[in-house]
Amino acid sequence: MTRPSAFLAVLLLACGACSRGARQSTPAAAPPPAAANPEGDSYVTSTTSLRREPVEAQRVKALGGGSPNSNLLAVLQRGERVTALEHRGDWAHVRASDGTEGWLRSSLLLPADGVTEGTVLAQAWAFDRPDLLAVNVTRKVDPGTLLLVVKTKELFSEVDLGQGQNAWILSDRISTQPADVMAAKLVEKARALARGGHPAEAREVLGLLRARLPDSPLAALLALDLGEGGADGGAADGGPPPLPAPPPPVRDPLR
């Protein structure tokens, strides 16, 4: 090789090394961070107030300095689905099913992703853990309770019972049929009204349940809860004929 050729070869090798070094020293472009998206469907786990501002005060200042406005926008029932828009401390800004936006406590929201709605048609045992030996003999799940199933493991399902309470129950006791879930939501509403001292309104909800789901065994049970019938669950006010009583709970072998 002539001297110019040797010089050219060395120059080419040096340029190649420089090129490789430049490529190695340039870090790979990091992927763009995922956009923060606070939105998401959630269940309301306990009856609560939807508020204009994220404070407990009953009235808040009006825009423009007018008379204070009521801070209460609506009452949301357990099992309602809302869209979480943002979080601020202990509060969540949500959009209700009718489009109304307001604030409620974040602790009352359960993200809907992976959650299944259900109920029990007969009284069910509650377990502290997914193990038959962990049966809690002091806790029962009443028929018509709206369950938010968050996890399953072997024979058991972990369910949200509201008021910050979770329990495990046997999965074969849970009905996820749409008609039974709809009935349970109305039962929850009626029971909440009765506890709040509104028995007449609770009976109106019972009437809606009978009209929409006349074959639901939960209608007869709710009638008994509201004191409308005798042992057969029949209505005492001349309403629709009584529905057949639901089958008795299966006797649990651990009892």
Image (cartoon, grey):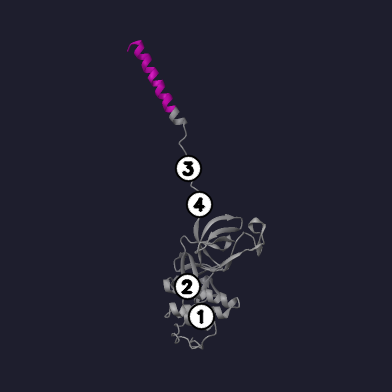
Residue sitting at 54 percent across and 82 percent down?
226
Q: Nearer the viewer, residue 246 or 215?
A: 215
| Amino acid type, label 1 | Leu
Camera-nearest label, 3 or 4: 4
Of helix, strand and loop, which one carries label 1?
helix
Which residue is labeled 4 in the image?
37
Which residue is labeled 3 in the image?
32
Which residue is labeled 2 in the image?
119
Of helix, strand and loop, which one carries label 4?
loop
Q: Position of residue 244 (x, y in %)?
A: 43, 85
Of helix, strand and loop, which one carries label 2?
strand
Residue sitting at 51 percent across and 83 percent down?
223
Residue sitting at 44 percent across and 74 percent down?
180
Q: Position of residue 162 (x, y in %)?
A: 55, 68
Mark 4 crowd level (few <14, some 14–19, many ≥20, 10 Å Cα): few
User: Which of disc 3 and disc 2 is earlier in sequence?
Assistant: 3
Query: Marks 1/3: CA distance?
Result: 54 Å
Query: Marks 2/3: CA distance?
Result: 43 Å
Mark 1 crowd level (few <14, some 14–19, many ≥20, 10 Å Cα): many
Which residue is labeled 1 in the image?
222
Query: Marks 4/1: CA distance?
Result: 41 Å
Query: Marks 2/4: CA distance?
Result: 32 Å
